[in-house]
Amino acid sequence: MPEKIKVAFVCVHNSCRSQMAEAISKLIAVESFEAYSAGTETKPQINQDAVAVIKELYGVDMNDTQKSKLITDIPPVDIVVTMGCNVNCPFLPCKHREDWGLEDPSGKDKSEFIKTAKIIEEKVLGLMKRIPSLLP
């Protein structure tokens, strides 16, 4: 059986959007690809507002399942999805790269985190459908 496609969700701090994308992908895309998240810097802990929303919506406690990682901490990947860094997005070698342009909900109210999670879910589902055309 061929190796599963590896997808990395990257942003600068690997504490909010990329972590949310990793958690959601591990739930809904496990048959399509292996999900990782990483950044060029790390924070001491994942954004606790993001943790609360992912736990409420998906039943996953990211404090237990994930930690903040550097891009050097993950294996080589096939696809890199940047979350919308608004700065220099981290570079990671890959076969396909795209930017989802998501605003960082950090410091905003819970509804922004829920909105971000739902957008990520839609984009992950879309990515799953597009993988065969992205990596022939």
Image: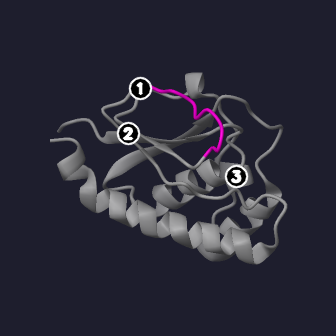
Q: Secondary structure at mark 2?
A: strand
Pointer 2 local density, CA inside 10 Å: few below 14, some 14–19, many at least 20: some
Corner quadrant of residue 102: bottom right
The secondary structure that dominates the magenta segment is: loop
From the viewer's perspective, is the residue at label 3 or at label 2 nearer?
A: 3
Q: Which mark is residue 6?
A: 2
Amino acid type at circle 3 is Cys
Read off the magenta span. Answer: 85-92
Q: Which mark is residue 76?
A: 1
In front: 107, or 73?
107
Query: CA gap, disc 3 to disc 2?
Result: 20 Å
First of labels 1, 3 by sequence position:
3
Amino acid type at circle 2 is Lys
Pointer 1 local density, CA inside 10 Å: few below 14, some 14–19, many at least 20: some
In front: 73, or 127?
127
Q: Secondary structure at mark 1?
A: loop
Corner quadrant of residue 45: top right
Q: As drawn, is 134 to the left or to the right of 28?
A: left
> Can you give x and y, in whole percent of width and height, for residue 68 in the image?
70, 38
Pointer 3 local density, CA inside 10 Å: few below 14, some 14–19, many at least 20: many
Query: CA gap, disc 2 to disc 1?
Result: 8 Å
First of labels 3, 2 by sequence position:
2
Say above or below: 86 vs 28: above
> Which residue does the image show at 57% across and 22% down from the upper left?
72
- Which residue lies under the disc numbered 3? 16
> Which residue does the image show at 76% across and 48% down from the upper left?
46
Say above or below: 122 vs 37: below
Asked if marks 2 and 1 touch (Cβ < 8 Å), the reply is: yes
Amino acid type at circle 1 is Pro
